[in-house]
Image: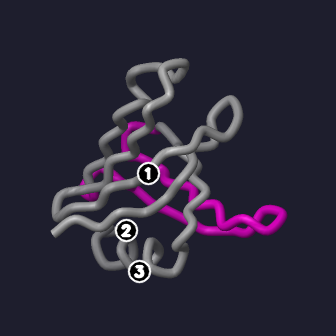
Amino acid sequence: MKNYYIASICRNGIIGGAIIADDGGISYKTGKLTVPPELRDLRMEYRDIRDFSKKWVLCFPVFTIDMKDGETYKFIIFSPGKFHSLLFEKVDR
């Protein structure tokens, strides 16, 4: 089953796109051609996520996802409650 979330990644600015969640992980996708290819279609398996957190910045819910390889990604998610529940259920921290 797939769930879709309107999201923006915070990396050298705010880049609009979407997060698609399935049984194995989440994928951030954007159609912006000026974004590096590794961010245009970013896959994060639940088993590779070390930790996550949510905080409010100005009036936006910002999720920080820390990967086991040391990489950190920040996203503005426009359905924060549902996304938080998904990560809380799927990520073993």
Query: Relative to 19, is 26 on the left or the right?
Result: left
Q: From this view, report whether residue 51 is shown above or below residue 80.
A: above
Q: Position of residue 70 (x, y in %)?
A: 46, 38
- Mark 2 vs mark 3, foreground winner is 3
Other residues around mark 3 within 10 Å, as few (<14) / some (14–19) / many (≥20): few
Residue corresponding to mark 3: 85
Measured in 3D between alpha carbons, the distance from the residue under mark 2 to the one under mark 3, in whole angstroms, is 14 Å
Q: CA distance from mark 2 to mark 1?
A: 24 Å
Where disc 1 sits, the SS reads strand
Report the disc number at residue 18.
1
Numbered range of the magenta stretch: 46-70
At label 3, which amino acid type do we have? Ser
Instruction: Determine contact: label 2, label 3, CB under 8 Å.
Output: no
- Inspect the image, locate mark 1, and give the three-letter code of the amino acid beneath it: Ala
Q: Quadrant where the N terminus lies?
A: bottom left
Quadrant of residue 76 within the rendered picture: bottom right
Image position of 40 with respect to 68: above or below = above
Instruction: Left or right? Give the position of 76 relative to 28.
Output: right
Q: Nearer the viewer, residue 55 or 28?
A: 28
First in sequence, mark 2 or 1: give its number.
1
Q: CA distance from mark 1 to mark 3?
A: 17 Å
Residue topped by disc 2:
93
